[in-house]
């Protein structure tokens, strides 16, 4: 079970997530988000990241510019969230080889893994970053392959049930492990990772 903790700005929280067993950490660069990281914050998080995938998450930045920024800062992955086109993904991949796609079933009801040439697909709720659970019965998991990540409204209390219902390749969380918008809670990070791991063992 691949576990990604997203929206990190504090290197102490990044270190904690990694120590608890996270496979990936994400840094959001989107000025409208409560989780928006400055260049200094992003660099500080990357400085403590070892042995995990590091992802730069954007949703309005030009794809090629975002790819260049991800490369300059030293991220492993660029995650394009929202309505980026096939051409956008191609432009990004010419700069950084590993590009992930995050989108919503609400925006793309016929969603299929690999449509944009992405390495991984992240399936989010209709309102990204809201922390609101969504109707998982709308997922046609047969189209999603095995490398997709489930996101949107997940938290330590419901992640096990979500994994049992959808059997994703992994999970992604941001607001569900926060004590306030943009403020990560170390205890909830640990609880989330543990619950996801246990649920994965149960469905094997």
Image (cartoon, rainbow, N blue to C red):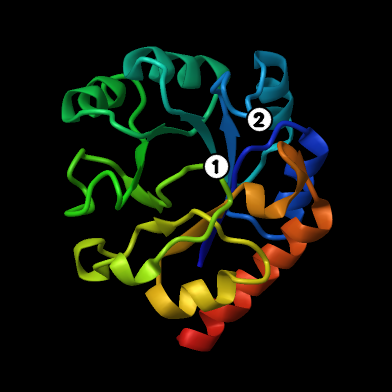
Q: Quadrant of residue 67?
A: top left
Q: Residues within 10 Å of mark 1 (few under 14, many from 20)?
A: many
Picture coordinates of residue 8, whole percent (x, y):
68, 37
Residue 186 is labelled as none
Q: Are marks 2 and 1 in contact (CB under 8 Å)?
A: yes
Mark 2 and mark 1: span between their CA atoms? 9 Å
Residue drawn at x 36%, y 25% as measured from the top left: 96
Q: Quadrant of residue 44?
A: top right
Residue beneath disc 2? 34
Picture coordinates of residue 42, whole percent (x, y):
66, 24
Residue drawn at x 60%, y 71% as measured from the top left: 158
Above or below 90: residue 22: below
Q: Quadrant of residue 134?
A: bottom left
Q: Secondary structure at mark 1?
A: loop
Residue drawn at x 51%, y 60% as measured from the top left: 133
Which part of the image, by quadrant, shows the C terminus?
bottom left
């Amino acid at each position: 079970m691949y576990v990604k903790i997203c929206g990190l700005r504090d290197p102490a929280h990044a270190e904690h997530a990694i120590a608890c067993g996270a496979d990936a950490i994400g840094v959001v660069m989107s000025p409208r988000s409560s989780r928006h990281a400055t260049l200094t914050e992003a660099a500080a998080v990357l400085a403590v990241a070892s042995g995990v995938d590091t992802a730069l998450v954007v949703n309005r930045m030009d794809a090629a510019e975002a790819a260049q920024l991800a490369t300059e800062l030293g991220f492993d992955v660029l995650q394009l969230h929202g309505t980026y086109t096939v051409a956008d993904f191609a432009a990004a991949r010419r700069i950084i080889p590993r590009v992930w796609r995050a989108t919503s079933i609400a925006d793309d009801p016929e969603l299929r893994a690999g449509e944009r040439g992405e390495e991984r697909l992240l399936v989010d709720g209709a309102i990204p970053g809201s922390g609101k659970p969504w109707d998982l019965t709308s997922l046609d998991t047969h189209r999603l392959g095995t490398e997709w990540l489930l996101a949107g409204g997940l938290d330590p209390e419901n992640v096990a049930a979500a994994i049992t219902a959808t059997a994703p390749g992994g999970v992604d969380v941001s607001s569900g492990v926060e004590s306030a918008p943009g403020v990560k809670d170390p205890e909830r990070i640990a609880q989330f990772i543990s619950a996801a791991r246990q649920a994965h063992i149960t469905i094997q």
